[in-house]
Amino acid sequence: MSKVTEMTAKLAEPVVAAQGCTLWDVEYVKEAGSYYLRVYIDKVNGVSIDDCEAVSRTLSDLLDEADPIQDPYTFEVSSAGADRALKKPEHFAAFLGEMVDVRLYKAQNGAKAHTGILQGYQDGDVSLLIGQETIQFSKQDVAQVRLHVSF
């Protein structure tokens, strides 16, 4: 599957840049028996539906030409979102000092979900400041890290 995401990212980057956006992430997943190819984009002042539509139309044609996926799939382009998942080292670097939600595979300190200030990221390990204490979560324990959104 990484070949699909890598090829899609390579095709998407110039298309996304031409729209004044940056490529946040590409995922190719199987959900409920169907495949989805998702391209997430970002923009300084926010992504509009017009941005998504422009990227989708152009990139869809490029994907049809390159034909990197054999199985039927649904193609989606969307904003990375306010509660975007942090996956790459550059994502973590950009949001050091921000509130994040860390979800774990199994409970640690009595909970599977922890919210705190992102203090560090190294080789998949995540450090959060929770209250006055810095807690380190190891890569193998972390299921997901997302920006925290409070209402």
Image: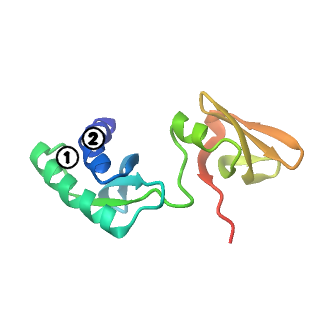
Q: Is residue 121 left or right of residue 57?
A: right
Horizontal and vertical percent position of residue 39: 34, 53
The residue tagged 1 is 69
Q: CA distance from mark 1 to mark 2?
A: 7 Å
Residue 87 point in image, percent of width and height: 52, 42
Horizontal and vertical percent position of residue 142: 63, 42
Tell me which amino acid carries mark 2.
Val
Q: Are marks 1 and 2 in contact (CB under 8 Å)?
A: yes
Disc on res. 32: none
Residue occupied by mark 2:
4
* Residue plotted at (32% across, 62% down): 52
From the image, which quarter does the C terminus lie in?
A: bottom right
Residue density around tag 1, few if under 14, some if 14–19, many if 20 or more, within 10 Å: some
Q: Is residue 74 visible?
A: no
Q: Residue at (37%, 47%) from the top-left corner?
A: 26
Q: In this orientation, which residue lies closer to the viewer: 141 or 120? A: 120
Q: Residue furthest right?
A: 132
Q: Give whichever of discs 1 and 2 has the lower sequence position.
A: 2
> What amino acid does circle 1 point to?
Ile
Residue 123 or residue 62, whichever sits in front: 62
Image quarter (top left, top right, bottom left or bottom right) of the N terminus: top left
Report the residue at 19% width, 51% height from top.
Answer: 71
Left or right: where 115 falls relative to 130: left
Residue 113 visible from this viewpoint:
yes
Check disc 1 and report its element: helix, strand or loop: loop
Tell which residue pokes out farthest to the bottom in this image: 151
Above or below, 61 against 124 in this view is: below
